[in-house]
Image: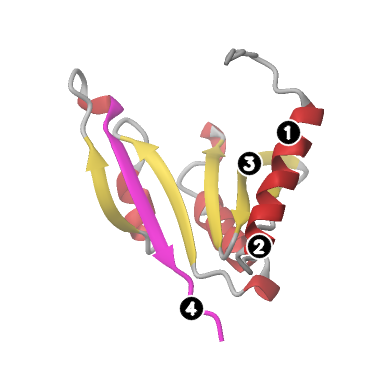
Amino acid sequence: MEIQYTARPDESIKKLAEAQHEQYEQEHSVFFGFTPFQLVAREEGEIAGVLSGWAVYREIMVDDLVVFAKYRGQGAGRKLLAEAEKLFPEREIDYAHLVTNGFQAPGFYEKCGYTLEFVRRSPKDPKYDKYYYSKALNRS
């Protein structure tokens, strides 16, 4: 068997893999529904922050959250997270998840209602410790 590395994923192979996921999930009566999304916060037309992630099964994964320096401390990050948590109401999303590093803002996520599940410590530098968070989303 040969393993091939590529720095730029081939879209046709990606679609083939997604189709296999969907087929496997259908065989097990599970909805896969991988759906990428992006939210953009703007202040007077200027981009203040961006949140990207995806929904899969009944969960949301926050992949990246950035608030531009000029807008930090003004609630943009909190608003982006809150908006992401409201996406996909038809899926009855159970949890939102995210991972952040020690040098980023672990305490911020706790203020937004996220629960620290565990920390994977870096053996060399605590700035690179990985903080794994989740938040139960109660939908009625």
Choose the circle earlier in sequence order: 3 or 2. Answer: 2
Residue appearing at x 66%, y 48% in the figure: 21
Name of the residue lying farthest toward the right: 12
- Residue highlighted by disc 1: 14
**Is residue 112 visible in this depiction of the protein?**
no
- Residue highlighted by disc 2: 27
Mark pair 2, 1: CA separation: 20 Å
Q: Quadrant of the C terminus?
A: bottom right
- Residue highlighted by disc 4: 138
Choose the circle earlier in sequence order: 3 or 1. Answer: 1
Choose the circle earlier in sequence order: 3 or 4. Answer: 3
Residue 138 lies in the magenta-colored region:
yes
Circle 2/circle 4 CB separation < 8 Å: no
Percent position (x, y) of residue 49? 61, 41
Task: Answer above or below: position of 44 versus 90.
Answer: above
Percent position (x, y) of residue 16? 76, 37
Q: Amino acid at mark 3?
A: Ala
Picture quadrant where residue 128 is located = top left
Q: Secondary structure at mark 4?
A: loop
- Residue 48 image label: 3
Which residue range is magenta in the image? 128-140
